[in-house]
Amino acid sequence: MPELEGRGNEGIFFMVLQGLGKSTMIAAMANLLNYDVYDLELTAVRDNTELRKLLIETTSKSIIVIEDIDCSLELTGQRSKKEERSADEDREKTETETRKEHHKEETGSRVTLSGLLNFIDGIWSACGGERIIVFTTNYVEKLDPALIRRGRMDKHVELSYCSFEAFKVLSRNYLRLESHPLFDKIESLMKETKITPADVAESLMPKSPLDDAEKCLSHFIQALEEAKEAAEGHAGEDAAAQPQENSH
C-alpha cells in the first residue's frame, strides 16, 4: 500500500482491470487512515460549479474516488482529434459516440476537463487538511495527459494479476495456512496462468462447514487448470485466424 500517513493532500491513479482489487485497496486505505470515502459519479454532477461545491463539502480527512474516469468522453485525450475532424467525419460518428452524447443530454452533465483540473488543483491549493483523490481506469491511453501528470496524480499504481506471494497471503487469511503440499503445484500453475485476486479469494473461501483447507485448495487448482485451458484455447483460435487475415 502507498506510504500515505502525514503526507498532506495526495493524488493516486489506479490503472486496473476489473476484479484486480481497486475497491478493496481503497477500503483498506480508508480503514488504515480512518478517512471518510466519497464516491463521486461525474455523470451525476450538473456542471463545474456543482463540482466545486461538492469539493467544499468534503471533510478534511477524506478519500475522493472517481472510478472509471475513461468512461467520460469529455475527459479523454480526444480534444485535438475532435477539433480536426471534417464535416464529413462528423456525419459519420460511431454509434458509441452518439449514445454517449445522448446520455450526456439526458443527465444534463456539463462537467469539462478544465473544470475537473480546477477541481483537483483546488484540493491541493485551497483546501487544508489531508485529502486523497483517487482516479481509476481500465484504459489509461484514452485519458488526456494533463489529467494524470505528475503533480496532480502523485502516485501511479498498476494493480496486476495475483502472484504466488499474494496467493499465500490470501490462503493465510482464508484458510490459516502457512504452507501445504499442494502449494508447489499451485505455484507452478500460477506461473502459467493469469488469475485475479477476486477469483483466488472466491476459490479459497469455504462453501460449506465441511470444506477443509485441502478441498478449497483443490477447488483453486481446478480453477487454475480451467483458466489455463481457456487461455490456450483462445491462443489457438487467434493463431488459426492469423493466416486468414494475412490472406486477405
Image (cartoon, rainbow, N blue to C red):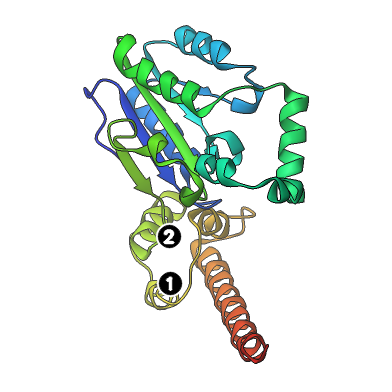
Is residue 43 visible in the rendered structure shown here? yes
Answer above or below: position of 35 versus 21. Answer: above
Instruction: Give yes or no for contact between labels 1 and 2 (Cβ–Cβ under 8 Å).
Output: yes
- Residue 167 drawn at (x, y percent): 40, 60
Residue at screen point 43% across, 73% down:
186
Q: Secondary structure at mark 2?
A: loop
Give the number of callouts. Answer: 2
Badge 2 amino acid? Cys
Badge 1 crowding class, 10 Å Cα cut-off, few under 14, some 14 to 19, many 20 or more, is many
Label at residue 104? none
Closer-to-camera residue (8/118): 118
Is residue 176 visible in the rendered structure shown here? no
Q: Alpha-carbon distance for marks 1 and 2?
A: 8 Å
Name the residue that disc number 1 marks: 190
In the picture provided, is 111 more to the left or to the right than 140? right
Answer above or below: position of 136 versus 234. Answer: above
Label at residue 162? 2
Residue at screen point 62% across, 91% down:
243
Residue at screen point 48% across, 73% down:
193
Closer-to-camera residue (1/69): 69
Where residue 233 sits, quadrant-wise, is: bottom right
